[in-house]
Amino acid sequence: MERVITGIPGFDDILKGGIPRRNVVLLAGGPGTGKSIFGYQYLYNGLKRGEHGVLVALEEHPVQIRISMSQFGWDISEYESAGEFAIVDAFTAGIGEAAKRERYVVRAPDDFQALVDVLRAAIRETKAERVVVDSVTTLYITKPVLARSMVLQLKKILSGMGCTSILISQVSVTERGFGGPGVEHAADGIVRLDLDEIGGELRRSLIVWKMRGTAHSMRRHPFEITDKGIVVKKESMEIPREVR
Ligand SMILES: Nc1ncnc2c1ncn2[C@@H]1O[C@H](COP(=O)(O)OP(=O)(O)O)[C@@H](O)[C@H]1O
Ligand SMILES: [Mg+2]
């Protein structure tokens, strides 16, 4: 079976070699848990391997995303110029000077079909193999009944176009779920990032809840965010009951 190597230190081992190709993985977590960084790192590592990528930006300005990525040493500008990487701007609605320089702009970010059309064009033109949507929660926050069908539609398109994708899902600080309703059933994989205060200290950990097509670690693994990005540890970690 073909796998996509995330290149995130320690993470591919947890998945016994990487994400099975064409899987759509829900990356769920609370604020500040490292979801966006995980997504950027996955895309940048792909570019270094010659696997093109698309990032759908629903939550942050594309200009801000380029700055955030460069802070980890992930310079995407040459890949953008070469047409190997694209940011789909579903954030600015084309408003502002900086937005006028964006190539893929969703004029009406509330219009899901418009977003899908721009995303398809971006994947086709860049020949993307990796896609990250940051975040899918933004798509259905005002219409939760559509959540599952939107995720299913995205899955059909992304998997159908041969992409291996990460859909970022926001959950609240106290929620232990995956962001819903029902989206977790539509995804091929679920990875949950956590941030917990243990003994007066915030500790990061992740757990692979589900990954279609492969065995995976059933343990919770601590991870760190360094100036080179996410590093996942081999050892397992327990969150004390009183914290949960
Ligand atoms: N250079 C860095 N070194 C260590 N930690 C960092 C660095 N940059 C950001 N962080 C951590 O990453 C967090 C933000 O991660 P992010 O992926 O944006 O979270 P999310 O998308 O889940 O809200 C920050 O709150 C901070 O704790
Ligand atoms: Mg984020």
Image (cartoon, rainbow, N blue to C red):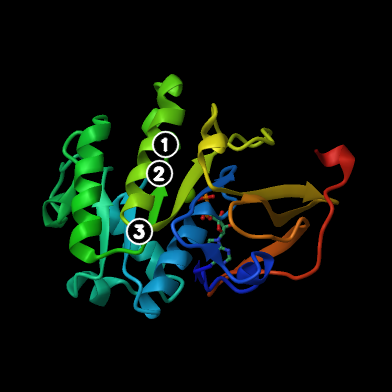
Q: What element carries label 2?
A: helix
Quadrant that contains the C terminus: top right
Residue type at mark 1? Leu
Comes first in the chain, label 3 or label 2 = 2
Q: How many numbered markers are drawn?
A: 3
The residue at the point 63 percent across, 60 percent down is 214
The vertical placement of 226 against 189, above or below, is below
Q: Are marks 1 and 2 in contact (CB under 8 Å)?
A: yes
The vertical placement of 11 against 152, above or below, is below
Can you tell me which quadrant of the image ligand 1 is in? bottom right
Residue behind mark 2: 155
Residue behind mark 3: 162
Q: Which mark is residue 152?
A: 1
Determine crowd level at label 1: few under 14, some 14-19, many 20+ residues with C-alpha closer than 10 A: some
The vertical placement of 43 against 183, above or below, is below
Q: Is mark 3 on a helix, strand or loop?
A: loop
The residue at the point 20 percent across, 43 percent down is 117
